[in-house]
Image: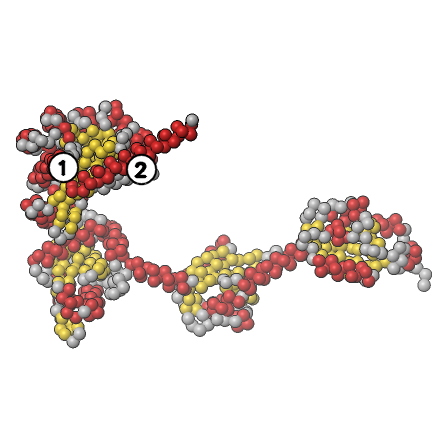
């Protein structure tokens, strides 16, 4: 049939040059391969996309040019088989550009059979499908995340109907996917939250496209659980289309664990009552509330009378049961807003807010004293109650409990089943201090005190220059007691001067005993400010030295604490000058810890400055302490006074002090304070160590000289 104007023109009738224009203009990559599969020609799109020119690829197999490290070898093998058989085929394959960039192509290859005088071979058309492949990979990753996520994921439409859930949703809620499709997520509601709660949630989503928080929901089996929920609104390109994506995890176990930790940290295991930590926290809150409301608080410390007898007679199990019963009675005797806490043993603290009065305290004691049965026996317990009132007793939470405790001991002194109200006007520790002073007085009479001695070292030659005398208390029941445990009670008391005189006499006696043993050892003795300023001090000291002519006064150093207040510096200066006239040395101890360092340094006649150990101990790690130590050494040098550093705990401390210009040291790094009987043996051992060290140094020096020759 003849061609009509509308019928398609056969390709054989079209000018080949015009057909070539098609290959040139196409954005697809076109290749012509010979019968062996080698490249004969490529179009311009191929060159632009791959970066390879025709001259660079002509005569090569496509895989020789385009394959890369991640190209699938099985796909390459299949392509070769198709080419060998002369078959048409389609394959997706990963190729690489000349610069090494990967890209995906869909390859369509058709054979040319050599008809009409055309050389046999293949025509290959390649389409870049990298975007599609990346999208497919993203979808696969998203699907994998959706399926394998440990968080439950719910997708709903714009009407909030469920259109998909992941396996984690079924695992957490118990509902299968088929059971919930098309339903509203409200099927999980536990009923715990109000409408206002959910209304606020949706308002946040409408405003910000997101909400995150904790929600109580219910599983299919009716069990409630708490979830950490995140909801996002996802908008699509078409108008009005959006979805909701909710992700949640079951945090019930975490919540329960947090409750267990809170209970362990804040509640008593035996009674379930708050412990001391929670009590003090509630007390701080109650104080703040009382301040705002202009109201008062009562803090009551209750201790059971003779409770040890129940444990001894009936055993600890029945004792524990008695404590639980007391806890219940105390709780019933107070209002719901008040607190009953057990702070250990048979001791309870009650925090009463608002109205409180003496009848209430008596009612608390009565509730405890009512008989109860235990181990088939009628048991009678009583309690002693101490009370302190806030804001009359205006102190912190810990102090309020402590004051109530002191009032409780006062109640015990009255007898059983009594209460006592703390009087803030009295000194908190007056009774305790009075008892301690009585005990110290008996200790002086019974010769329970002892002097320990700590060596002081000159670093230039490692020689021991003196020993500081330090008091210790050999308590018949408590054992050896350090001075920090009893000297504060002695300060400014009637025992301060007698105890100071004992130290002075004992130190001089010990010097005499060492002298008789062949060692003339110097001793430093601490003198308190009241003792120094006592009008009889110098006369007593002079008379004592005269009665011991064998002791050299020049070997005695009086250490005056800089941290104590010398109210009359002129008189103190005169006293110290008289001591120096007797031949004694004077050291200013704990320099830097008081408020009058420079005044004392300028006005008092002192021979030695002692740097307080609190600065020396931390000077290697604390720049401020190091600066203070350097400053004290500088001041001492400017006033032409030797300086001695206490608290030297390591050789690193000693080396640093030496570099700063301090040549005298004392501390645990050299030796701890020791009994007087151990001093001579230690001293001999120290000297042997020094001699051995000198011999080693001499041998090293000789060896080095020999090597030099």
Q: Residue at x 24, y 36 (%)?
A: 687
Tell me the element at label 2. helix
Q: Decide which of 118, 633 is in the foreground and name it.
A: 633
Horizontal side of 320 relative to 222 (left or right) equals left
Horizontal side of 43 relative to 355 (left or right) equals right
Residue under numbered circle 2: 651
Q: Which mark is residue 517?
A: 1
Horizontal side of 586 relative to 216 (left or right) equals left
Q: Decide which of 440, 457 is in the foreground and name it.
A: 457
Q: Crowding near pointer 2: few (<14 within 10 Å), some, many (20+)?
A: few
Q: Residue at x 75, y 57 (%)?
A: 107
Q: Decide which of 195, 98 is in the foreground and name it.
A: 98
- Residue 683: x percent and y percent? 21, 38
- Residue 144: x percent and y percent? 57, 62
- Residue 118: x percent and y percent? 90, 55
- Residue 590: x percent and y percent? 21, 34
Tell me the element at label 1. loop
Q: Are marks 1 and 2 in contact (CB under 8 Å)?
A: no
Horizontal side of 117 relative to 446 (left or right) equals right
Question: Quadrant where the C terminus lies?
Answer: top left
- Residue 477 visible in the displayed image: yes
């Amino acid at each position: 049939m003849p061609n009509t104007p509308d019928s398609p023109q056969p390709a054989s009738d079209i000018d080949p040059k015009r057909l070539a224009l098609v290959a040139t203009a196409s954005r697809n990559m076109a290749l012509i391969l010979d019968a062996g599969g080698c490249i004969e020609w490529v179009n311009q799109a191929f060159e632009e996309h791959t970066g390879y020119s025709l001259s660079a690829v002509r005569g090569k197999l496509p895989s020789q040019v385009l394959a890369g490290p991640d190209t699938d070898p099985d796909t390459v093998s299949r392509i070769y088989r198709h080419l060998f058989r002369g078959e048409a085929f389609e394959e997706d394959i990963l190729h690489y550009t000349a610069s090494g960039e990967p890209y995906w192509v869909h390859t369509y290859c058709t054979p040319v059979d050599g008809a009409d005088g055309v050389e046999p071979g293949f025509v290959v058309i390649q389409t870049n499908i990298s975007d599609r492949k990346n999208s497919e990979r993203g979808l696969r990753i998203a699907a994998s995340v959706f399926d394998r996520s440990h968080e439950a994921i719910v997708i709903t439409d714009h009407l909030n109907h469920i259109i998909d859930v992941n396996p984690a949703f079924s695992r957490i809620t118990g509902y299968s996917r088929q059971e919930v499709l098309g339903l509203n997520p409200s099927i999980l509601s536990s009923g715990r939250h109000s409408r206002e709660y959910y209304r606020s949630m949706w308002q946040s989503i409408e405003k910000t496209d997101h909400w995150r928080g904790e929600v109580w929901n219910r599983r299919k089996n009716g069990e409630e659980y708490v979830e950490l929920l995140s909801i996002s609104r996802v908008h699509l390109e078409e108008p009005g289309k959006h979805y909701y994506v909710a992700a949640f995890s079951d945090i019930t176990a975490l919540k329960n664990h947090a409750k267990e930790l809170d209970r362990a940290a804040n509640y008593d295991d035996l009674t379930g009552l708050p412990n001391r930590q929670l009590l003090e926290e509630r007390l701080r809150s109650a104080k703040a509330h009382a301040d705002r409301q202009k109201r008062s608080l009562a803090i009551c410390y209750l201790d059971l009378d003779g409770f040890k007898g129940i444990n001894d007679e009936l055993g600890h199990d029945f004792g524990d049961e008695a404590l639980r019963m007391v806890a219940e009675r105390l709780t019933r005797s107070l209002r719901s807003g008040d607190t009953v806490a057990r702070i250990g043993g048979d001791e309870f603290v009650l925090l009463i807010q608002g109205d409180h009065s003496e009848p209430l305290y008596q009612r608390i004691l009565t509730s405890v004293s009512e008989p109860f049965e235990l181990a088939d026996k009628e048991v009678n317990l009583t309690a002693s109650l101490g009370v302190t009132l806030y804001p009359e007793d205006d102190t912190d939470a810990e102090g309020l409990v402590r004051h109530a405790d002191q009032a409780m001991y006062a109640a015990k002194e009255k007898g059983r089943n009594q209460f006592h109200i703390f009087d803030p006007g009295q000194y908190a520790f007056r009774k305790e201090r009075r008892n301690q002073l009585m005990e110290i007085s008996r200790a002086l009479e019974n010769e329970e005190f002892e002097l320990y001695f700590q060596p002081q070292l000159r670093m230039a030659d490692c020689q021991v220059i003196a020993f500081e005398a330090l008091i210790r208390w050999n308590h018949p029941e408590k054992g050896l007691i350090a001075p920090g445990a009893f000297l504060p009670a002695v300060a400014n008391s009637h025992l301060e001067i007698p105890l100071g005189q004992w130290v002075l006499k004992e130190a001089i006696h010990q010097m005499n005993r060492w002298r008789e043993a062949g060692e003339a050892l110097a001793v430093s003795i601490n003198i308190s400010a009241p003792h120094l300023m006592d009008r009889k001090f110098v006369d007593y000291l002079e008379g004592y030295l005269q009665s011991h002519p064998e002791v050299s006064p020049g070997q005695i150093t009086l250490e005056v604490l800089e941290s104590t207040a010398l109210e009359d510096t002129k008189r103190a200066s005169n006293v110290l000058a008289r001591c120096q006239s007797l031949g004694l040395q004077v050291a200013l101890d704990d320099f830097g810890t008081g408020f009058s360092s420079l005044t004392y340094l300028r006005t008092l006649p002192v021979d030695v400055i002692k740097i307080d150990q609190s600065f020396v101990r931390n000077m290697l790690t604390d720049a401020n302490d190091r600066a203070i130590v350097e400053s004290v050494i500088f001041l001492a040098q400017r006033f032409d006074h030797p300086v001695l550093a206490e608290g030297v705990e390591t050789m690193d401390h000693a080396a640093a002090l030496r570099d700063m210009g301090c040549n005298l040291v004392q501390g645990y790094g050299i030796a701890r304070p020791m009994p007087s009987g151990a001093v001579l043996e230690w001293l001999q051992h120290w000297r042997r160590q020094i001699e051995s060290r000198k011999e080693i140094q001499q041998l090293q020096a000789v060896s080095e000289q020999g090597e030099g020759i």
